[in-house]
């Protein structure tokens, strides 16, 4: 195999990886118990290159890039439809394009499923469910 063929193959693999759906197979029921205190700390931290939630979301009703998370549980209940609030929240984190809040672009970082551990996801969800 020549250098050109290797480069074409490498580029094809890179594009397939970059364009993959990033669909996470984790479900809320498969997550370990979450710790809201750790989740609160994670909310403001960059983890494995993933931006902190607080980069785009506020807790005080003001707007940055994404919707505020003030009164999150009430808002999530309104949007969850047939899902539980916990499952809706997990999906919103790991597949953000699945639930776009009216008036906001589909701009949420889409690699949290690859950057956060199951424990970190559970902790963030536990924290969000306190809001």
Image: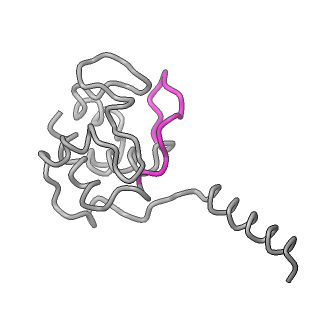
Q: Nearer the viewer, residue 33 or 5?
A: 5
**x and y percentages locating residue 35 in the rendered image:** 13, 52
> Residue 63 is drawn in which quadrant?
top left
**x and y percentages locating residue 121 in the rendered image:** 29, 54
Please state, as top left, top right, bottom left or bottom right, where the N terminus lies in the image: bottom right
Does residue 57 appear to the left or right of 86 in the view shown?
Answer: right
103 drawn magenta: yes
> Count of labels shown?
0
100 drawn magenta: yes
Q: Residue at the far top: name it.
A: 62
Which stretch is magenta?
99-112
Which residue is at 27% across, 37% downward?
44
Which residue is at 80% across, 68% downward?
7
Q: Residue at the far front: name it.
A: 3
> Residue 80 is drawn in which quadrant?
top left
Does residue 130 appear to the left or right of 67 in the view shown?
Answer: left
Which residue is at 26% across, 40% downward?
43
Q: Nearer the viewer, residue 48 or 68?
A: 48
Residue 7, above or below 124? below
**x and y percentages locating residue 11 in the rendered image:** 75, 63
Does residue 128 appear to the left or right of 88 in the view shown?
Answer: left
Q: Nearer the viewer, residue 73 or 118?
A: 118
Which residue is at 18% across, 33% downward?
131
Q: Main secondary structure of the magenta part?
A: loop
Residue 55, above or below 33? above
Residue 31, above or below 102? below
Does residue 3 appear to the left or right of 102 in the view shown?
Answer: right
């Amino acid at each position: 195999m020549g250098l050109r063929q290797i480069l074409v193959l490498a580029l094809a693999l890179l594009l397939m990886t970059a364009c993959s759906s990033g669909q996470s197979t984790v479900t809320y029921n498969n997550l370990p118990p979450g710790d809201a205190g750790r989740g609160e700390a994670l909310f403001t931290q960059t983890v494995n290159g993933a931006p902190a939630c607080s980069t785009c979301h506020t807790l005080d009703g003001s707007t940055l890039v994404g919707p505020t998370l003030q009164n999150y549980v009430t808002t999530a209940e309104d949007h969850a439809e047939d899902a539980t609030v916990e499952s809706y929240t997990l999906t919103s984190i790991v597949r953000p394009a699945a639930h776009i809040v009216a008036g906001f672009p589909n701009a949420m970082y889409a690699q949290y499923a690859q950057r956060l551990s199951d424990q970190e996801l559970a902790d963030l969800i536990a924290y969000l469910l306190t809001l």
